[in-house]
Image (spheres, grey):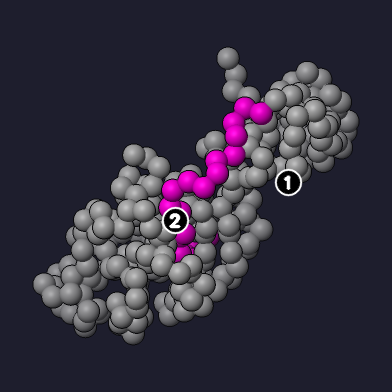
């Protein structure tokens, strides 16, 4: 049995309403999927749950759908949320970060500028389209907030009160780049992420992943001196930024999120 396609729409959703969707949706449903009158799609808007809709009319530049019934209600309240803060890297890798963060349930995706960030221009419209498509494919009922790129200090100030900042510290030592010891040395080593997360259950969190080349000693010292900041290690290997994002979000979901 073929899967009923899902589409994100910005319209209010309620039983019996008829939605007139534009050219892009019309092209996708009627020409790509070859659906005609009576064909079905699932619609969601991040507010009103998911609805089964049936095609009532097909035109060259629009398509009309009748909302037949709600298939899933929008969750209310829920558990803690997680925000991803990451330094943009190369185009394809950054696109992958946005896609995987959406798939792994990040509630917000914030690109940040650090001292070693190499890619400082990002296309917000592209990020939001990637997030939208990932949400459609992974059965999410909402879209993550994709924010404008901002300096790291400003992003940290914008975090909600009491949010635990989980800082992926690839050096793991207060001495940072000045330390010649393997894996950050013995003093000031960041805790293994699984162990640190056990003490953060029930708290909203933000995960910070740095750029190629990592954080500078100045940034590292500032982060380690910040309240509600928890340096963590993802192991003895230096991970690529996109790999670190997937690993960190997966661990958070397994311990603190909705995988349990």
Q: Quadrant of residue 200?
A: bottom left
Residue 223: x and y in percent read 34, 77
> Vertical placement of 40 versus 93: above or below?
above
**Residue at image point 84% right, 36% down:** 20
Element under disc 1: loop
Cα gap from disc 2 to disc 1, whole angstroms: 23 Å
Residue 121: x and y in percent read 58, 70
Magenta stretch holds residue 88: yes
208 to the left or right of 53: left
Element under disc 2: strand
Disc 1 crowd, CA 10 A, few/some/many (<14, 14-19, 20+): few
Disc 2 crowd, CA 10 A, few/some/many (<14, 14-19, 20+): many
Q: Are marks 2 and 1 in contact (CB under 8 Å)?
A: no
Q: Can residue 161 be seen from the camera position used here?
A: yes
Q: Give the residues in magenta.
A: 70-92
Residue 9: x and y in percent read 72, 42
Q: Residue furthest top?
A: 1
> Vertical placement of 208 versus 181: above or below?
above
Toward the viewer: 135 or 216? 135
**Residue at image point 43% right, 52% down:** 80
Q: Can residue 216 be seen from the camera position used here?
A: no
83 to the left or right of 259: right
Magenta stretch holds residue 170: no
Q: Residue furthest front?
A: 77
**Residue at image point 86% right, 26% down:** 57
Residue hosting label 2: 82
Residue 10: mark in rendering? 1
Q: Residue furthest left?
A: 186
């Amino acid at each position: 049995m073929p899967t009923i396609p899902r589409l994100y729409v910005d319209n209010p959703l309620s039983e019996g309403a008829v939605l007139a969707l534009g050219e892009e949706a019309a092209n996708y449903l009627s020409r790509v999927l070859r659906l005609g009158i009576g064909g079905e799609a699932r619609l969601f808007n991040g507010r009103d749950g998911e609805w089964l809709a049936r095609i009532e009319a097909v035109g060259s530049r629009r398509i009309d759908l009748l909302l037949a019934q709600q298939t899933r209600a929008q969750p209310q309240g829920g558990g803690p949320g997680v925000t991803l803060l990451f330094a943009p890297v190369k185009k394809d890798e950054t696109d992958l970060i946005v896609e995987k963060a959406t798939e792994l349930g990040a509630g917000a995706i914030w690109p940040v500028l650090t001292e070693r960030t190499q890619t400082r221009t990002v296309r917000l419209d592209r990020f939001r389209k990637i997030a939208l498509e990932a949400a459609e494919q992974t059965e999410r009922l909402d879209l993550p907030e994709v924010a404008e790129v901002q300096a790291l200090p400003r992003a940290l100030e914008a975090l909600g009160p009491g949010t635990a900042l989980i800082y992926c510290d690839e050096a793991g030592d207060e001495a940072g780049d000045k330390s010649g010891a393997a894996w950050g040395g013995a003093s000031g080593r960041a805790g293994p992420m699984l162990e640190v997360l056990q003490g953060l259950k029930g708290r909203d969190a933000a995960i910070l992943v740095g750029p190629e080349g990592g954080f500078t000693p100045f940034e590292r010292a500032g982060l380690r001196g910040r309240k509600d900041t928890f340096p963590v290690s993802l192991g003895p290997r230096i991970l690529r930024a996109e790999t670190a994002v997937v690993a960190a979000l997966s661990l958070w979901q397994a311990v603190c999120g909705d995988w349990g």
